[in-house]
Image (cartoon, rainbow, N blue to C red):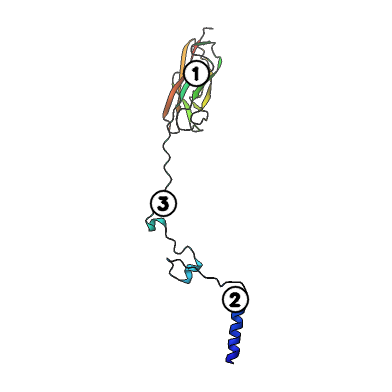
Amino acid sequence: MKRLLWLSFWITLVLAACSGRATPTIFIPAASTGNAADLNNPTSNIQPDSAKGISTPQPSPTPDCQSNLLYLEDITIPDGTDVNPSDSLDKRWMVENNGTCNWDYRFGLKLIAGPAMGADPEQALYPARSGNQVEVQIQFTAPQEPGLYRSAWQAADPEGKFFGDPIFIEINVLNP
């Protein structure tokens, strides 16, 4: 009987060696407790960076942008232009967004002095990325009374704070 057991043992050993498959070795990291739970949950030994004394980099804060508008030129209706009473006026200016904020739908132009001349006293400021030049347009109606009229406008940020160069329309309404 002993001989039969020895023979079975040797045959099993030879067959195992000839199969070409190695018996897998389970690697247990040095930090492991050796518990079976560690093998089923590979993250059980991972500590957060703060527990290891390592600080995790945080995104740097975005610097506050600065709003600015630079007046470049009148495109239509130069200052002092003679107009007739009640004329429709399509005033356009070329300006540059020379601040660091991009203008979006929250930015606007507001009347700061003089008559609105039929225009809404708050206008949209055309969206513009920082560093770009844009054309700004407002539709006016000349007053009926003769005289010199000047309407001044300035850009405002989303909080209503004024910034940049003011822009103007200055007209001379003729006597009919």
How many C-alpha atoms fall within 10 Å of the one at disc 1: few (<14), some, or many (≥20)? few
Q: Earlier in the sequence, mark 1 or mark 2?
A: 2
In the rendering, at what x and y percent does residue 96 appear? Answer: 49, 25
Q: Which residue is mark 2?
A: 17
Mark 2 to mark 3 CA distance (whole Å): 50 Å
Secondary structure of the residue carrying tag 1 is strand
Amino acid type for the residue under numbered disc 2? Ala
How many C-alpha atoms fall within 10 Å of the one at disc 3: few (<14), some, or many (≥20)? few
Q: Earlier in the sequence, mark 1 or mark 3?
A: 3
Q: Which one is in front in this view, the residue at disc 1 or the one at disc 3?
A: 3
* 29 up-or-down from 140: above or below: below
In the rendering, at what x and y percent does residue 148 appear? Answer: 46, 11
Mark 1 to mark 2 CA distance (whole Å): 91 Å
Q: Which residue is mark 1?
A: 73
Q: Nearer the viewer, residue 59 or 157?
A: 59
Q: Earlier in the sequence, mark 2 or mark 3?
A: 2
Q: Which residue is mark 3?
A: 56
Quarter of the image containing the N terminus?
A: bottom right
